[in-house]
Amino acid sequence: MEKATVHIALFAALIAALGLIPKLMLTSGVPITAQSMGIMMAGTILGAKRGAAAVALFIALTLAGLPLLSGGRGGLGVLAGPSVGFVVGFPIAAWATGWIMERLHALPISIAAGIAATVGGIIILYIPGVAGMALMLDKSISQAALLITPFLPGDVIKAVITALLTQAIFAARPASVFSRSGSSL
Amino acid sequence: MLALTYSPPTRLHALSAPIKLVGLCAITTALFIFPTGWASTILGGAALGLYAAMGIAFLRAGLRTLYGLWPFVVVLGLWHAWQDDWDNGILIIVRLITAVAFANLVTMTTPLQDMIACLVRLLHPFRRLGLNPNAVSLAIAMMIRFIPVFLARADQLKLAYRARSHRSGRWTILFPLALGMLDDADTVAEALRARGGITPKD
Amino acid sequence: MKNPHISINQVSLSVGGRSILCDIDAQLSDRRIGIVGRNGSGKSTLARCLCGLIKPTSGKVILDGIDIYADRKQAIRKIGILFQNPDHQIIYPTVGEEIDFGLRQIGHTAAQARDATRQILTRFDTLNWLDRQTASLSQGQKQLLCLMSILAMEPDVIVLDEPFSGLDIPTRRILGDVFQSLPQTVIHITHDPEAIETYDQVLWLGAGRIQQIGSPSQVLPKFMDAMMIASGLT
């Protein structure tokens, strides 16, 4: 139990630290952040339950008033704004990413992580994300979806980096990739 | 890394956190159930009034927290101008800003510890499902403890990268950063077990 | 061949109102230079300024005419640094990739980088490390890897920032011999005077300022006296 709690807490701290790495601007003018990769990696490395717990802990402390979201955002205001769907969706996306990762244990690590990160970190994340935006901006789903399309290329890049990182970490520390190792936390 | 609570304390700081949170829920619900110009304007005015009542410096700090909404205000403004739907446009913008303003007001006037206490209390029902509140408190403390550690390590790795490259390397350092975190987790878990582990929930 | 010349021009550095380095001014052109000081004297910060990793609040560091902070492309060819903790320095999962990295950054092609990597590994009799996981190396081995990664880039100057921390005695001696045999200028940051007794020049840093510069026989005894006083042993 100690191992699980510590891994959840430290992964949450890592996601917070990633929020302070400056955003990278793609040529399309859209920024991509390292933090969203941390969310996907929580799933690919810790698995569904622990990954979701780590992200939920991170979100909880952000809402409690720490400026941990990329760009130094935090507090309850993020729940009242247009990105509320994403904030709520992060733990769900981590859970989905982990769940898929655990199911795909027969595939090579990078492929499994890539699929998990794409389906969990992009497709599943955008469902609450777009819905929340539609609600807050009082627009239809398709209109809100239009708003987020510029971010998709960046997200695909992030999924690829997540896949490669997960593979490199597995090569260096196979026992620490709990979605695969089957060792109990 | 400081919390977003405003200092020095205002009168609203003294109000208990659960009351403020319930009030926030009520106001946000009202904002969305009554999507009329009247409701939004009155509540918006109330928000502005509350901020101003806490002092000019507080009001200025509050306005700064709303700055991040400007892209959405611009997009909404352009959209509704194009659709010739100004009334709705103004309503939505005012509602958005008002909701965020009230939420930020609670954050600015509630110390971190109080919010965490509320959070732990909200998790009470999950005890029956196996959640150990001692583990939760410990996890919160550990997370806060390690954020500066990982930030410092990220800085150090950036310097190490800069020592051999003219580029920025912000993505390459993710690997050693993640690996260091996993190694730290193993070490800390051992140290925790050596000191008796997490107290069981009963 | 002339020794590289480092000109530290009125360098000061403060962070958040706190002064860490104050008016550091020195001309360094010897082959073996030591920098001593207590913990907290600003030695590591000075090391980072010397390599152009952080920007002084005022003043400049010039190496053979190059502004080390501003001109990074030239700087990485001329000066390298070995940090205290190799875990904070190693970036890549395998040894080969780690050494390749710096070589690609200074302009080698993939093939040239591969060759140079093999060469440096062979020089230290560690060619079988080429595909090893960096995470599987011991502390001493990691430190050697960090050294090889820098030497492969063939800089004119190497800065060693307390490189023996956490290493056992045999490893220290082996690495110490390696440092002594290096053809480039070595700037060795340490709090242990024994390590730099045989050097050409010693700079004593105290509370962010230069206390003294001179030969080891001039500076080290005074430094040791000050350390004794500071520990209440006089």
Image (tube, rainbow, N blue to C red):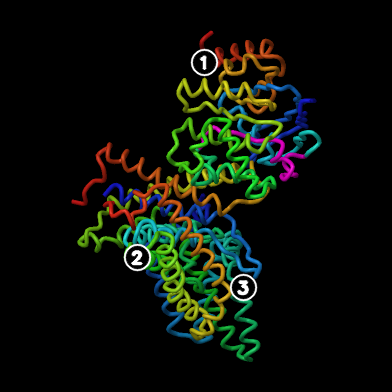
Question: Are the residues at dot 2 and dot 3 in contact (C-beta closer than 8 Å)?
Answer: no
Residue visible at 78% across and 38% down in the picture: C66
Q: Which mark is residue A104?
A: 2
Instruction: Name the residue nearer the viewer: C34 or C98.
Output: C98
Whole-percent x and y of residue C20? 64, 33
A142 in relation to B122, above or below: below
The single residue placed furthest to the top in the displayed view is C234
C106 in relation to C223, above or below: below
- The subunit carrying tag 1 is C
Element under disc 1:
loop
Cα–Cα gap, marks 2 and 3? 40 Å
Cα–Cα gap, marks 1 and 2? 61 Å
**Residue marked by disc 1:** C231
> Is the residue marked by circle 2 packed among few (<14), some (14-19), or many (20+) residues within 10 Å?
some
Give the number of the mark in front: 2 or 3.
2
The single residue placed furthest to the right in the displayed view is C65
Give the number of the mark in front: 1 or 2.
2
As shown in the figure, which amino acid type bears the numbered disc 1?
Answer: Ser
Element under disc 2:
loop
Q: Quadrant of the C terminus of chain C?
A: top right
> Is the residue marked by circle 1 packed among few (<14), some (14-19), or many (20+) residues within 10 Å?
few
User: Quadrant of the rendered structure where residue A95 is?
Assistant: bottom left
Q: Quadrant of the N terminus of chain C?
A: top right
Q: State whether residue C25 appears in this view.
A: yes
As shown in the figure, which amino acid type bears the numbered disc 3?
Answer: Pro
Instruction: Name the residue nearer the viewer: B138 or C187.
Output: C187
**Residue marked by disc 3:** B71
The total of numbered circles placed on residues is 3
Magenta highlight range: C67-86
- Image position of A47 (left or right of B35): left
Whole-percent x and y of residue C111? 63, 48
